[in-house]
Image (cartoon, rainbow, N blue to C red):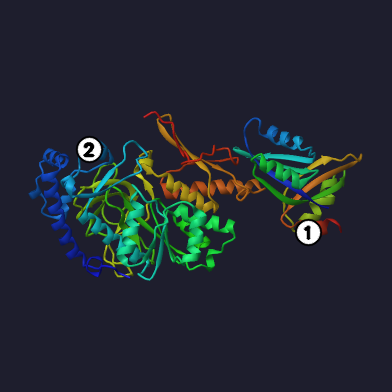
Amino acid sequence: MKVKQISIFIENQPGRLVAILEALKAKNISMLALFVSDTTDFGIVRMILSDTALGIKTLREANFAVKESVVLKQEIPDVPGGLLETIARPLTEAGINLEYFYAFLDTTPGKATIIIKVADPDKAEEVLSR
Amino acid sequence: MIWNTKYETMPRKELEELQLERLKYQVARVYEKVPFYRQAFMERGITPSSIRSLADLARLPFTVKQDFRDNYPFGLLAVPMEQVVRLHASSGTTGKPVIAPYTAGDINMWAEVMARTLSCAGMTKNDIMQNAYGYGLFTGGLGFHYGGERLGATVIPTAAGNTKRQIMLMEDLGTTVITCTPSYSLTIAETALEMGVDLKTSKLRLGVLGAEPCSEQMRQEIENKLPIQAIDIYGLTEMVGPGVSVECPHKLGMHIFEDNFLAEIIDPLTGEQLPYGEKGELVLTTLTKEALPIIRFRTKDITSLNPEPCKCGRTLVRMSKITGRTDDMLIIRGVNVFPSQIESVLLEVEGVEPHYIIVVDRKRHMDTLEIQVEVSDEVFSDEARKMEELEKRLMEEMESTLGISPVIKLIEPKSIPRTVGKAKRVYDRREL
């Protein structure tokens, strides 16, 4: 299923993630998923929030550069080969390139949730629903 | 339209003969009347008879801003005070202002070069010119005023400020030409928008904009927001005020009124003259000023000269837009770098007004240049790869423009402190 994700630019400096989390906490916004990637000089924080629009507004007011994008949220069985068979192989066979993805264990036992970023989320969603 | 065909389209050889004749006269006058110049000439073993060709100009000493301060207020005056009919002054942001005295002859010459300026910009006697330059000590207001009247146009002396009333008069009186600073023209556009007035349906058609640098990007913005051709002009209090040079509607450089102002380009470090086409510091000599004749004034403005005749028919040398000031110039690893070059690369690559600082340091006897650029929502990409590509592109463009490679550091929005006045862009931490 398609969900909205926000990405935030941060400098690789102590305290930057704290500033983001404090801003969100102050507006009572909770995170459903979080992923931090970094290069040598800067990082990109990606998160799925309980309230995307309010989150973007809040973070822009706190002087962060923020982008909204659409990602796919997919539940997969938490078993060996689960990611391979339910996501990776079908997308590869359909010729869809994964830009990045991140996974976390679901609250449902035996399940994991994976967030997938692709160039064309509609097409990927259609492939995965087959 | 060409206001003065004789001088504005004169064959260059003939023009140079005229310039030489006038230069000889000016040198003789300042030698006789101005002790400051007499002493400077004597120190170099120069007498008026030393000037035999225009090439001898290079032997004459420079005049710099400090010389105006040292001779404040009337030390450089070349006529008795009774012949002075008016005094103007620069804003004097650093210490005492520059005092500019004019004889009746100077006022007449000024009106002539300003009539040429306005005519060159595309104005005619049928135009209604709203003059929103400041009136008073500043040369802008009265300079444009006299030029507009000399041309035969209708001049509305609104002066700067009270923008809502400006806009009301503009609509009610059918203003066709606005004369003001480039930034004030944008204030007018924005205020009109707030008032719900659509200036695109007004009679406004031309803006003659000067007194501050106007980049090509700023011109685009002005022309998008107002229904005008935005024409750039150049002038300075030390020469006459506005009226030194102006663009024609072809916008291929500003035509210098060389029968009155002799232009050279020099290397700001060595003081050597540079050939046509090369970028350097503009140096100007007045050829017809009576009260305040000035020899080889170092303007600190960076430009280049093009002597090719223009499409408009003028044979006058053209100066390119001012691309920087020598006081802003940084020498990094022996290379001259101007902050304006860095800004134009950022603007070109990012497509938006950049917020940046330039940090120069010296590590292990080696100069380093770091450019810190704020990442705006517009340039931020969710993909780290694209952000790294942006860094790489900025670095490559900087290297090809500046001739040295900088370190690019992307930083968070608003991490550079905002100031009300002129932004501090350069942090030179070298201990030289």
Q: CA distance from mark 1 to mark 2?
A: 76 Å
Q: Which mark is residue B80?
A: none
Quadrant location of the N terminus of chain B in the rendered image: bottom left
Give the x, y percent position of residue B199: 53, 64
Q: Could you tell whether B357 is left or right of B57 in the image? A: right
The answer to which of B185 and A82 lies nearer the viewer is B185
Give the x, y percent position of residue B316: 27, 63
Number of residues whose C-alpha sits closer than 10 Å to that of mark 1, classed few (under 14), some (14–19) or many (20 or more): some
Q: Could you tell whether B313 is left or right of B410 in the image? A: left
Q: Which mark is residue A122?
A: 1
The answer to which of A86 and B428 lies nearer the viewer is B428
Residue type of the residue flagged with mark 2: Asn
What residue sits 40% from the left and 51% below the top? B213
Observer able to see residue A32: yes
Observer able to see residue B256: no
What residue sits 32% from the left and 55% below the top? B143
Which residue has dot 2 on it? B71
Numbered circles on residues, count: 2
**Element under label 2?**
loop
As drawn, B401 above or below B328: below
As drawn, B147 above or below B212: below
On the same chain: label 1 and label 2? no
The answer to which of B161 and A51 lies nearer the viewer is B161
Residue type of the residue flagged with mark 1: Asp
**Element under label 1?**
helix
Q: Could you tell whether B194 is left or right of B123 in the image? A: right
As drawn, B429 above or below A57: above
Select label 1 or label 2 by which is in front. 2
- Mark 2, chain letter? B
Give the x, y percent position of residue B146: 31, 59
Number of residues whose C-alpha sits closer than 10 Å to that of mark 2, classed few (under 14), some (14–19) or many (20 or more): some
